[in-house]
Amino acid sequence: MTADPLARALRAMTWLCLAVPIAILLRPTLATIVSTAGRTALAGVLIHRFPVVAATLGLATAVGVVGTAAGAMMAAVHHAYRFTGRGFLHWMTLAPVLLPPVTASTTLLQIWGNNGVVAQLTGGDWVSVYGFTGLALADILAMVPMAYLAVLSGLRTLDEGLIDQARDLGLPTRKILRVIVLPHLWPELAAVFLLLVANTAVDVANPLALGGSYQVLATRLREAAIGEGDAVGAAATSAVMLAICVLAWLVMTAISSRPGSAAPQQSSIRTRRRPPSSVWQRVMVGLAWFVAGANALSLPVVMLGSVIDTTSGLSWTASGYRELLAGQNGLALADSVIVAAGATVMAMVAGSAIVSTGGLRRGGSVSTNLLASSALTLPLALGALEIWRRTGTSGNSTSTILVLVMTVQGLVLVPVVVAFLRARTDAMTLPIRQSAAGLGMAPARMLRPLIIPQLRPALTAATALAFVMGLTSVPSVILLTGADTPFIAAQIVTEVEAGRLTEACTLSTVTAITVALVAWGIWLSAGGRRRA
């Protein structure tokens, strides 16, 4: 397809339309490298704020190690074993996707906080969820679904025929794991670890809710940009965060290009799942249920928290829903839905153009694309804030901020859409080439009769995922939210910071319901009822 001049022109135009706004929005961050004031501020961050940098990297490393291990364990259990409730376990693991990232912090505060359920029932604080411990736990819970999906995609590329032969020859599971599985999976595991490290380094939602005195780079950036009005200092902090992500991306690329990290094998043999038989296998399944339960706990906790007031005893209340109907929170929901819908359209158009004009060659790994999405969000949002603050730009506050946030969200969602669609086209590469060879056709000519029909479910899922991520994104809106243009994700963080957990839970519950209804509507509009 890339040999077609029209496809090349469309691809070049798509990349140009993405590169221009990215360059404009990244200008404040990149200017720190060339300007004297910027280099001075950058040196100040690295020297005088080095404890903040070290705290960020320490937290990110802890989350990366534990999150990768938990995600790999759950992916292995789901992929290898057959047991009752396996499908339910999968959806329990993915339950946090319906909710804003800060919901993990809200859940911990509702249960273990100073005014949480445990404190109300026992009259004492048993566990402190503020600082490093609570922050690490919240980030791990938020990151596990990402690690789980990334490792699961790697497991699905294993040569199942080779594993079945090893089992038939009587090789123990440990040896199969050591000789066959780990050598194949270690690049993916390393990429997942680096992805979680980078995502934690740029996370701003949970540190604002639970960080307390444990300051990280993301909260320092917000403090400089909003609290102090220090644009240069905020840009310098943004540059350090971006450098961490770029370094992670370079290491990912180096690992994937090594001779031992060849392209994943395509296997048409389905996984032969077996019931867990040994004690160790049963323990793994039990641990998977425990982690999935902890992940899924957020949804019922915030739903109950939206109607239970824990500030002065445990009492029923509907104040959060009344305020949603009459107050600023209703406007926040409307603004967020509008922006997420526009960003989804932008990302789907650009992502589909990139994938459709890229031919049948493989794209980057899922982890690489997700890293590209998360790394740019805060730097792009900082650039949008600088544009809004320029003289004459902030006159029409509402429309300007909506357009800026929509642009930021659309840009960072493009890599997610590309990764999602590429995963599907990569799985079809070998069958398409075989079918084309059998029919005597060029693979590119299989686009209309074979590729597009197979991609329709993936397009539907990618649309729903992009909308969910746009609606629940905190970094893209945390610097631009205000009284005239509130956004629901930032409003949840504000409510948690103010100790208004009932209102925060109400917003999280409404967000989950909105996400479920929109995803269901997208599924129905794409013919989901007929396929079912």
Image (cartoon, rainbow, N blue to C red):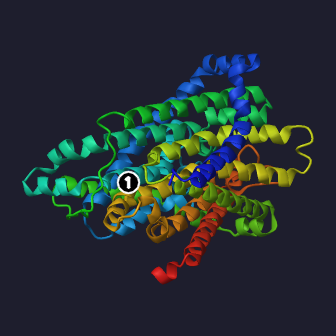
Is residue 368 visible in the rendered structure shown here?
yes
Q: Position of residue 182 (x, y in %)?
A: 26, 43
Nearer the observer, 483 or 233: 233
Q: Residue at x 22, y 57 (%)?
A: 160
Q: Residue at x 26, y 67 (%)?
A: 83
In the rendered view, does 203 fall on the left or right side of 136?
right
The image quadrant of residue 486 is bottom right
Q: Which residue is mark 1?
A: 153
Nearer the observer, 277 or 517: 517
Q: Residue at x 79, y 37 (%)?
A: 386
Q: Residue furthest front?
A: 440
Q: Is residue 70 above or below residue 29?
A: below
Number of other residues with Cα within 10 Å of mark 1, as a class: few under 14, some 14 to 19, many 20 or more: some
Nearer the observer, 116 or 12: 12
Q: Position of residue 232 (x, y in %)?
A: 75, 26
Q: Residue at x 67, y 51 (%)?
A: 409
Q: Specify the amino acid type for callout 1.
A: Ser
